[in-house]
Image (cartoon, rainbow, N blue to C red):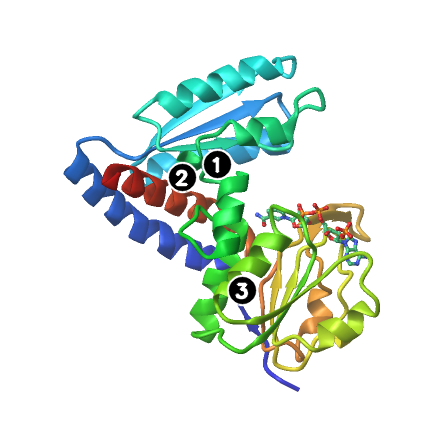
Amino acid sequence: MVETAIIDGKAFAEGLRARLKGEVAAYTAAHGTPPGLAVVLVGSDPASSVYVRNKAKQTVEVGMASFEHLLPESAREDEVLALLADLNADPAVNGILVQLPLPAHIDTQKVLAAIDPTKDVDGFHVVNAGRLAVGLDALVPCTPLGCVMLLKDRLGSLAGLKAVVVGRSNIVGKPIAQLLLREDCTVTIAHSRTKDLPAECRQADILIAAVGRPEMIRGDWIKPGASVIDVGINRVSGADGKSRLVGDVAFAEAQGIAGAITPVPGGVGPMTIACLLQNTLTAATRQAEG
Ligand code: NDP
């Protein structure tokens, strides 16, 4: 039986934002204007609206300029593309983020492709995905970046460790796998067609769950002492009828088996916006350097 450490993503993200505040002040002093982040929201999905408000608040708190563009659900694709062309050309805007999901009548891939890759702070543009895959400097998706920061903070070097990533989406699973490969892990990517998923998971020194299925990964799928990063955010209703958030890992079962685990909420989630701000500063700095 091991003592399972709880990885406090909230505290880590607070520390990261405090460090960024200092770096943003230095950038602003050197360049005369602060780094600027533009967020585009189409429609009024409640979860997306809350997320966009939080992004804007935290952007301002670290000393950056925040530009919010709230378009109605009925906005046409060409209107979104025209806005992105303006933002690409605006020197006050160093980072652009389009909140997903977009309404069904808008082609998400077309919209993501219209963002200048040097301002693509979500790291979803194919140019950034490609640069990450071939080992060039890239803007890296925020949640995966946050996961790897937490792992490196806990473990130091990840070289030689066996990592299993459950989930292969373009926004979470695949970029996490690429980042872990960059850290010299031996990486397995599992998905819905993987045979004997529990056996794959039991091999992992680092187990990443990015599936979106409440508590799917059981305690006895975890190698004793493994570091477990739970990306999943699932709303379930409890016995009392109230809803609560759970991850993709059966958190209670992991206690005493995992060496460390991120809780949900309070683990990976808070890292995402902090990494978005980090990416915005990275983008601004690279743009200033030409
Ligand atoms: P997707 O639905 O895009 O991808 C889910 C992945 O899980 C797919 O690759 C799918 O496989 C795989 N999968 C589904 N069922 C199984 C199964 N039974 N066994 C093994 N693999 C399975 O989700 P996302 O990647 O966008 O998000 C994953 C989770 O992370 C969600 O809970 C989401 O809310 C959360 N999330 C959290 C963020 C944060 O903390 N800030 C940010 C982004 C996401 P296949 O490809 O074969 O279909």
Vertical relation: 287 (above or below) 178? above
User: Spatial distance from mark 2 to mark 1, Cα to Cα?
Assistant: 6 Å
Tell me the quarter of the picture where residue 216 sits: bottom right
Residue 180, labelled with which disc? Answer: 3
Residue 147: % across, % down = 52, 59
- The residue where tag 2 is placed is 58
Residue 54, labelled with which disc? Answer: 1
Residue 143: % across, % down = 54, 50
| Quarter in which the C terminus is drawn | top left
Amino acid beneath label 2: Gln
Tag 3's secondary structure?
Answer: helix
Tag 2's secondary structure?
Answer: helix
Q: Nearer the viewer, residue 155 or 241?
A: 155
Amino acid beneath label 1: Asn
Q: How many marks?
A: 3
Q: Earlier in the sequence, mark 2 or mark 3?
A: 2
Circles 2 and 1, Cβ within 8 Å, touching? The answer is: yes
| Quarter in which the N terminus is drawn | bottom right
Question: Is residue 141 something one can see in this rendering?
Answer: no
Circles 3 and 1, Cβ within 8 Å, touching? The answer is: no
Residue 191: % across, % down = 75, 58
User: Spatial distance from mark 2 to mark 3, Cα to Cα?
Assistant: 28 Å
Residues packed near mark 3 inside 10 Å, few (<14), some (14 to 19) or many (20 plus): many
**Is residue 141 left or right of 226 when viewed as pictured?**
left
Disc 3 residue lies near ligand 1 with CB under 8 A: no
Q: Earlier in the sequence, mark 3 or mark 1?
A: 1
Vertical relation: 261 (above or below) 86? below
Residue pictured at 63% horizontal, 54% vertical:
173
Residues packed near mark 2 inside 10 Å, few (<14), some (14 to 19) or many (20 plus): some
Circles 2 and 3, Cβ within 8 Å, touching? The answer is: no
Question: Is residue 107 something one can see in this rendering?
Answer: yes
Residue pictured at 15% horizontal, 39% vertical:
30
